Amino acid sequence: MELGHRLKLFRVAADLKQLELAERLGVSKNYVYMVESGRREPSLEYLKAFSKEVDVPLSLLFLEPVKRKDAKGRKVIEKVITLLAEYAKVVGVSESA
């Protein structure tokens, strides 16, 4: 999954429209669209501001799904899921949210 698509998913999960996000970040709606569609690479400044706006750690924006069928790969994925679940508890996000 491309970075732009992941950003769109986080934006939608935060219940933000492109225009609203653009206004909050001081960029154009077209810039948000171009980033989400993969036509433009976001700047680090944009990613930092984005992560704060949607309340998601910057590092999580770069977490890509890994397709591993071997036992070692599954263990790594299970560990990441466990760590994310622990993080959610720390920041007060319930599983039903």
Image: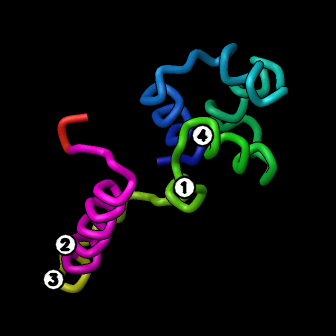
Identity, as a three-letter code, of the amino acid under mark 1: Pro
* Residue 41 horizontal side relative to residue 10, left or right: right
Q: Please tell me which of labels 4 and 2 falls first in the chain.
A: 4
Mark 2 against mark 1, which lies toward the viewer?
1
Taking the spot 76% from the left edge, 38% from the top edge, the residue there is: 40
Find the distance from the CA under tag 4 to the CA under tag 2.
26 Å
**Residue interval drawn in magenta:** 74-94
Neighbor class of circle 4 (other Cα within 10 Å; few <14, some 14-19, many 20+) is many
Residue occupied by mark 4: 4
Identity, as a three-letter code, of the amino acid under mark 2: Lys
Find the distance from the CA under tag 2 to the CA under tag 3.
7 Å
Mark 4 against mark 1, which lies toward the viewer?
1
Q: Which mark is residue 71?
A: 3
Magenta stretch holds residue 17: no
Main secondary structure along the magenta-highlighted residues? helix
Taking the spot 74% from the left edge, 24% from the top edge, the residue there is: 24
Mark 3 against mark 1, which lies toward the viewer?
1
Neighbor class of circle 2 (other Cα within 10 Å; few <14, some 14-19, many 20+) is few
**Residue 60 appears at what percent x and percent y?**
50, 57
Residue occupied by mark 1: 57
Badge 2 marks a residue whose secondary structure is loop
